[in-house]
Image: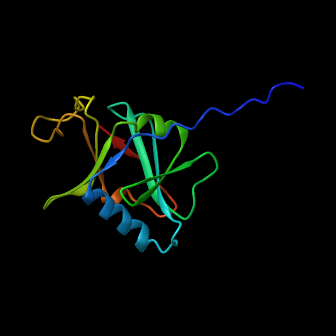
């Protein structure tokens, strides 16, 4: 009888959520009306001016191939590629008089060079505007 092949363990990323990001994401999920098992689907893929783009939306359950990462009281649904890309990232929520949204902070990445000096994000910080959130229809957003 041949030996049984074991599946390799699933690598879950080391993601940090600030309290502001956790509050914002929990609010999105709670007001979506999707129930207690709902979470935020977050898909990060290669693309955009800095090498990544993302899509996210509140969802009732993870899709096939996604894993659930619970961090800071928040349930994130992540595919394999997103789990790799998000490792070591801090997710924050910022709000100013003119804009608000999630920021993805990568301590090992420089800021995107396509922005002007006045509007350039801090090194390794990416903004995702609130308007990018769509229930059941994630909107692509460039990640710097």
Number of numbered tags placed on the structure image: 0
Residue 75: quadrant of the picture: bottom left
Q: Which residue is located at x 19 percent, y 35 percent?
A: 115
- Work out whether 83 lies above or below 31: above
Where is residue 68 drawn, in percent x and y? 52, 52
- Residue name at image x 32 percent, y 31 percent: 50
Residue at the image position 40 percent from the left and 39 percent from the top: 86
Task: Please tell me whether residue 12 is drawn above or below residue 24 in the rendered image.
Answer: above
Compared across the picture, whether 97 is left or right of 63 comes to: left
Using the image as rendered, state which of residue 53 and residue 89 is in the foreground: 89
Residue that extends furthest to the right in the rendered view of this protein: 1
Dividing the picture into quadrants, the one containing residue 46 is: top left
Is residue 67 in view?
yes
| Nearer the observer, 138 or 95 | 95
Q: Position of residue 122 (x, y in %)?
A: 17, 38
Give left or right: position of 19 versus 46.
left
- Percent position of residue 98, x then y: 15, 59
Quarter occupied by the N terminus: top right
Residue toward you, 129 or 15: 15
Q: Is residue 83 above or below residue 58?
A: above
Farthest residue, direction top: 2
Q: Quadrant of the C terminus?
A: top left
Decide if residue 139 is in sight here: no
Residue depicted at 29% across the width and 57% down the height: 21
The answer to whether residue 3 is left or right of residue 143 is: right
The colour mode here is: rainbow
């Amino acid at each position: 009888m041949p030996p049984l092949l074991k599946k390799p363990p699933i690598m879950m990323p080391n993601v940090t959520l600030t309290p502001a990001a956790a509050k914002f994401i929990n609010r999105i999920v709670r007001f979506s009306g999707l129930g207690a098992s709902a979470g935020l689907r977050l898909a990060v893929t290669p693309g955009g001016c800095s090498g990544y783009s993302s899509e996210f939306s509140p969802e009732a359950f993870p899709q096939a191939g996604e894993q659930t990462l619970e961090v800071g009281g928040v349930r994130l649904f992540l595919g394999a590629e997103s789990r790799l890309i998000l490792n070591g990232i801090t997710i924050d929520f910022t709000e100013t008089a003119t804009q608000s949204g999630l920021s993805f902070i990568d301590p090992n990445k420089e800021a995107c060079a396509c922005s002007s000096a006045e509007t350039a994000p801090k090194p390794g910080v990416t903004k995702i505007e609130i308007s990018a959130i769509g229930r059941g229809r994630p909107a692509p957003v460039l990640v710097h």
